[in-house]
Every structure is written in structure tokens, then in C-alpha cells.
Amino acid sequence: EMKTSWKYIRVSALGFVGGLVCPHHDTTQSNGTPRAEDFNEMLLKRRTEIGLCIENNAALVIDGDKFKVITTDGKARVLKKTVEGGEVVEERIGGPGSFESIDWE
């Protein structure tokens, strides 16, 4: 039986990237809430942090100070989210192919 009443917590993880990271960002969790909604709420509480959102079927590959996005379906994305003027703003980062410089600001 899946637990349906729970909340996300912030953990320090391994420190490969700064800010908040949300894997499977485009899915709905077992409590019936889209992960994107919960993630946006957490990001609004930590307005100075960057959010990296990795959709289902995507991976963020980091090599030193460069990254690239790989997907299994050719559609999945990685988004960078920030808070501007009290609103969450998102932009797609990377794409299939070559490595790009990391800009976590």
C-alpha cells in the first residue's frame, strides 16, 4: 500500500550542484499532487536558490563545469527555475547533444 499523506523535505545530497533538484518533475506523486506544484512551493520558500527540474525520461549529465541533457524519448527536458518578483520563472536548459557551460546563477 502506498502512503498518500507526506511532504517533501530538503536534504543536502552529494553537493554536485547547488540549489534544489527535483527528479521526475513532470509526474504526479502518490499523494495525488504534481511534483511541479510541491517543488514550486519549496522554491518560493527559498527564493535565492536555483531549482533544477529533471523530467521523467531525462538525465542531467555533469562533467566538471559543463553539462548536457540526455533523454530516452527525445522529448523530456531539464528546466532551471528561479523566483522573480514572487513568481516562479522557468527556462529550458541544455538539449540533446554537446556539453554546455554551467550557469547556476
Image (spheres, rainbow, N blue to C red):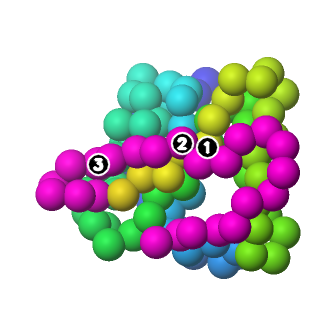
Residues in magenta, as a range: 83-105
Q: Which residue is mark 1?
A: 78
Residue drawn 29% across the image and 48% down it: 88
Hey, what amino acid is under mark 1? Val
| Outermost residue toward the left in this view | 85
Q: Which mark is residue 18?
A: none
Q: Nearer the viewer, residue 3 or 58?
A: 58
Residue 32, percent across and down? 42, 23
Residue 88: mark: 3
Q: Quadrant of residue 72?
A: top right
Q: Do tag 2 and tag 3 residues touch (Cβ < 8 Å)?
A: no
- Residue drawn at x 35%, y 37% as measured from the top left: 37
Specify few, some or many for label 1: CA neighbours under 10 Å numbering under 14, 14-19, or 20 or more.
many
Q: Is residue 84 left or right of residue 77?
A: left
Nearer mark to the viewer, of 2 and 3: 2
**Is 102 included in the stretch rendered in magenta?**
yes
> Callout 2, which amino acid?
Arg
